[in-house]
Amino acid sequence: MTQINLAVAGATGWTGSAIVDGALAAPDVSLVAAIARSSAGQDLGTALGRESLGVPVHGDVAGALGGVDVLVEFTSHEHAKVIALTAIEHGVAVVIGSSGLTAADYADIDAAARGAGVGVVASGNYSLTAAMMLAGAELAARHLPQWEIIDYAKSTKPDAPSGTANELAERLQEVREPKIDLPPDQVAGRPDARGANVAGTQVHSIRVPSFVVSTEIVFGGPDERLVLRHDAGGSAAPYVAGVLLAVRKVRDQPGLIRGLDRLLAG
């Protein structure tokens, strides 16, 4: 069994702390470093309100990468790109968890990773069931010509659409763009009520309390509909298995892989 030395950026956060627990329980993963500016200089266990784990918390990424094979990033879209590029520069593979990066950001990360011979995995959602939804949507898009996406999240979510919805729209564009009977800019009244065009798909972002992240794609055909929906619960537990899958596979090839579903078949 090959041992993977892991660092987690955002290790004290909502998702990051769940990834920490998953890494500690995994027999083939050694958690060797954490990055969290507010807890820099502490032991990670202390920072999490637990017993000492013997894992140092660093305030910057570069200082945490010694002896690290893979860096998992769950910080924010403002910092994710810089963190990823820093890890790539040091020859460390990266699993990107933050949403909100643009297609141009991903292109820059892919170019840097290929140039350095380093692997990167990025996914809008690391839930295995969300990955299965995306794979099913790709299959449906090959046969059903029209669809739209509804993106639900908590009222305080800072980015729209969610990373899950954005990734879904971009991946479906690789299949084809949906047929639109009446272009949104020709709608009477308020064309903006038809949502935002994301990679050719109309996406409607709803932000109200009680949701974490839910993504629904509605396909339509003559006198029938197909609805695929993923709902995330109130904990970060669903993302741990997918992140660990990415950690184990990210070094298999250089460059960026977008979408956890692309790792499921291997």
Image (cartoon, rainbow, N blue to C red):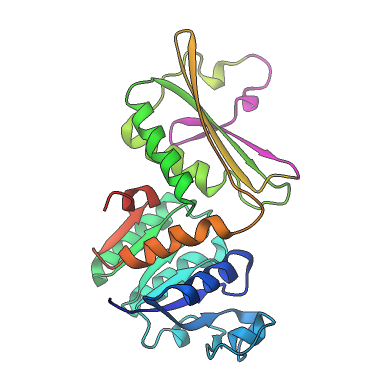
Residue 85, above or below 98? below
Give x and y (percent) for residue 237.
57, 59
User: Which residue is rendered at x = 34% and y = 80% of the image?
Assistant: 90
Residue 220, above or below 48? above
User: Which quadrant of the structure image shows residue 3?
Assistant: bottom left
Front residue of this view, candidates 64 and 223: 223
Give x and y (percent) for residue 155.
73, 47
262 sits to left or right of 26: left
User: Which residue is rendered at x = 32% and y = 26% of the image?
Assistant: 142
Query: Which residue range is magenta in the image?
Result: 188-209
User: Which residue is rendered at x = 53% and y = 66% of the image?
Assistant: 74
67 sits to left or right of 240: left
**Tag count:** 0
Residue 102, above or below 6? above
Front residue of this view, candidates 103 and 163: 163
Residue 50 in view: yes
Give x and y (percent) for residue 28.
36, 75
Residue 208 within the magenta-colored segment of the rendering = yes
User: Which residue is rendered at x = 56% and y = 16% of the image?
Assistant: 186
33 sits to left or right of 262: right
Residue 76 within the magenta-colored segment of the rendering = no
Q: Residue furthest top?
A: 223
Give x and y (percent) for residue 192.
63, 27
Image quarter where the N terminus lies is: bottom left
Residue 259 in view: no
152 sits to left or right of 266: right
